[in-house]
Amino acid sequence: MAHDLTLDHLRNTYSQGITTPRELIASLLKQALQQANYNAWITLLTREELEPYLEALDRLRPSDLPLYGVPFAIKDNIDLAGVPTTAACPDFSYIPRESAFVVKLLIEAGAVPLGKTNLDQFATGLVGVRSPYGEGKNSFNQEYISGGSSAGSAIATALGQVSFALGTDTAGSGRVPAALNNLIGHKPTRGLLSTTGVVPACKSLDCVSIFALNCQDAAKLLDITAKFDSADIYSRTTPSSNRLRYFQESFPNNKIIFSFGIPEQPDFQGNKETQTLFNQSIKKLKLLGGQAVTVDFNPFIEAAKLLYEGPWVAERWIATQGVKPKSMLEVIRKVINSAETKTAADAFLGQYRLQALKRICDKTLENVDFIIIPTIPTAYTRQQISEQPIQRNSILGTYTNFMNLLDYSATAVPVGFLSSGISWGVTLFSQKYCDMSLLSFSNSLHQACNLPLAATGERPGETSNQDSGSRH
């Protein structure tokens, strides 16, 4: 059931009359139901529920809207009007009257929502197995975790059920699943995408993230959704000196001159395969014209520990005050209840330490265009996570938890595969508002890796017998 659902390819398919949005989406819904054992979805829209979105496209041409007929998925802590938002907690469920600000922008651009995807309950976790709606399973090897908390969004995109998906990323939830499912996962600058209509995890840190099949798609989606929202108290806009349109599909002559940082002693938890892929990524960046600079990464690691070991966990406690403890999964309750020992003094002390660490980390970034890190040190099976759910979840956050605390932008890029069959990747990160620059660098690295299209087995631009719902 392979489809090339990249944005340019899908637009060409529609323009040539090979298929229609209604035909394609009917095929994708059937596919999603056949692949239900991956536990990607909490709510799939019915054909009747999808009809208003499709009817709105009937009077238009593919050239009229930038995302005409593009199918997408929405993490189920982000509102879609008239559809339950559960945050993977049935007792918490409510039906919003309006869609989230970002969802509205996508629908206005012509995108069609297929439904709401599974997640670690209340977006608390990096594993994708903390849900009463079933454990998210890796799109390449179901014995392995999909990564979380945006598990379902990544799985649906990787399996070719949608062109892209919205996740959220507070501690790494938009990057860990991307690494494990061969996707681009962009965590934008905090506040660049509105969080109006998003169930908060840590309100001051939350980001809506994008899962895409390539960097060009991620850049286009970011350009469409990065709009100021006066209703979001944390919303902000990119300064004119860093306009989003600076993204380039490729660098001149495929040769660029830049510098990038690498951690002095990266942690791979003894996994030689991930270490090899990381070293290969560094070599590819050097061939693209990059100069590697070794950096002391200890301040970044210390900042990462503040997210769950420091006072910021209290924000998760605030966000779930209306939820009965018995309605939460035990592991979620344990994480959130740790906030009850935090004091106001802890909150201020944590802010002081974070500010001191940020000054050090910012200084490190001043000397390079970006830093490359493992997205995750290693990969775990679902069984391994069940044996040590908190400790191994914490290990997965080694290189993700500091990002929003330090106010950085980041792009997760898949770079290869492990012997288990699952994918693995690196993350490129830099200062706030460097989103398009990062996507440009990531694009060159991603192209150099020459990977297949997510988990579909297709190569970008190839045509399969069932390509995009072909009529013949």
Image (spheres, grey):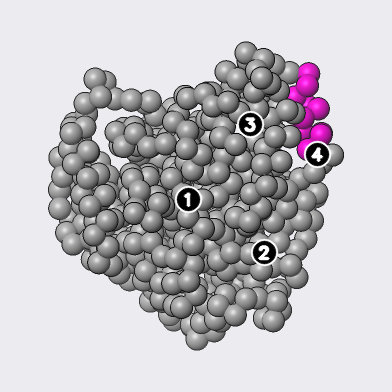
Q: Which residue is mark 1?
A: 140
Disc 4 residue type (three-letter): Arg
Q: Secondary structure at mark 1?
A: loop
The amino acid sitting under disc 1 is Phe
| Residue closest to the eye, 364 or 235 | 364
Magenta-drawn stretch contains 57: yes
Q: Which residue is mark 4?
A: 47
Which numbered disc flags the more N-terminal residue, 4 or 2?
4
Residue pictured at 57% horizontal, 75% vertical: 332
Hey, which residue is sitting farthest right in the picture?
Answer: 48
Q: Where does the image place residue 190, in percent across and percent down from the top left?
A: 47, 50
Q: Which residues are magenta?
A: 50-59
Residue 322 visible: yes
Name the mark nearer the viewer: 2 or 1: 1
Labels in figure, total: 4
Q: Is residue 429 above or below residue 354?
A: above
In the image, 277 versus 428, the foreground residue is 277
92 vs 297, left or right, is right
